[in-house]
Structure formats: structure tokens, C-alpha cells
Amino acid sequence: MSSKELKSLFEKYAAKEGDPNQLSKEELRLLIQNEFPTLLKGPNTLEDLFKELDKNGDGEVSFEEFQELLKKISQ
Ligand SMILES: [Ca+2]
Ligand SMILES: [Ca+2]
């Protein structure tokens, strides 16, 4: 997946509620369930993933934080 594709995915889901430039936990859940369901197989829970992505701990995931997901997808 290119970073351009990742950006459009991010925008699609981040706009669902609250700040359109930030993914809430619910928005992240929808995005992962619909687009990357395999990420939640095995030991990783959404809670773990959210904490991992939300580096500054403000309870939302910015696009900058979200890009870390690319590394996980390509692993
Ligand atoms: Ca949002
Ligand atoms: Ca954050």
C-alpha cells in the first residue's frame, strides 16, 4: 500500500466523527475491521494497537501516528 492510499483511507475513516483529522478509537476499530482484519488475529487487540499508534497519548490517532501502521502491515 502506498502512503497516498493510506492517506485516503485515513481521511475516509477519520471524518466519521469528531475531528476529521484524527482517528478516534471507534474510527480506528472500523478502519481495522474493514480494511485490515488480519491485524486483529492472534494476540493483538484493538486496545493494544490503539495504544501503540497513539504515541502522544491524547486519545486520538493523527495521520502522522497512523503511518506507523504501514510498518505493521508490511511485516
Ligand atoms: Ca475523527
Ligand atoms: Ca495521538
Image (cartoon, rainbow, N blue to C red):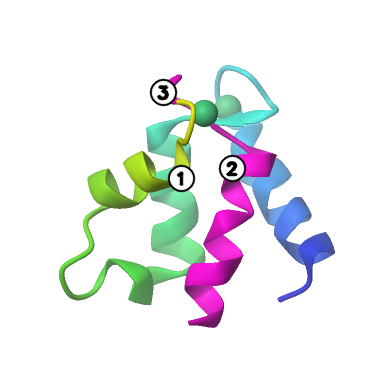
The CA span between labels 2 and 3 is 12 Å
Q: Residue furthest right?
A: 4
**Residue type indicated by callout 3:** Gly
Say which label, 2 or 3, has the lower sequence index: 3
Left or right: residue 45 versus residue 63 is left
Ligand 2 is within 8 Å of the C-beta of the residue at disc 1: yes
Query: What label sits on residue 65 in the rendered view?
Result: 2
Q: Secondary structure at mark 3?
A: loop
Q: Is residue 47 magenta?
A: no
In this view, 43 is above or below 62 = below
Q: Which stretch appears magenta?
A: 57-75
What residue lies at 45% left-to-right and 36% top-to-bottom?
A: 54
Left or right: residue 15 versus residue 26 is right
Ligand 2 is within 8 Å of the C-beta of the residue at disc 2: yes
Question: On the image, numbered disc 1 is attached to which residue?
Answer: 53
Query: What label sits on residue 59 in the rendered view?
Result: 3
Left or right: residue 1 versus residue 36 is right
**Residue type indicated by callout 1:** Leu
**Residue type indicated by callout 2:** Glu
Ligand 2 is within 8 Å of the C-beta of the residue at disc 3: yes
Q: Residues within 10 Å of mark 1 (few under 14, many from 20)?
A: many
In this view, 2 is above or below 56 = below
Say which label, 2 or 1, has the lower sequence index: 1
Residue 1, by quadrant, is bottom right
Q: Residues within 10 Å of mark 3 (few under 14, many from 20)?
A: some
Q: Residue furthest bottom?
A: 75
Q: Give percent across and percent down for residue 34.
A: 46, 63
Residue 14, by quadrant, is top right
Q: Secondary structure at mark 1?
A: helix
What residue lies at 78% left-to-right and 63% top-to-bottom?
A: 3
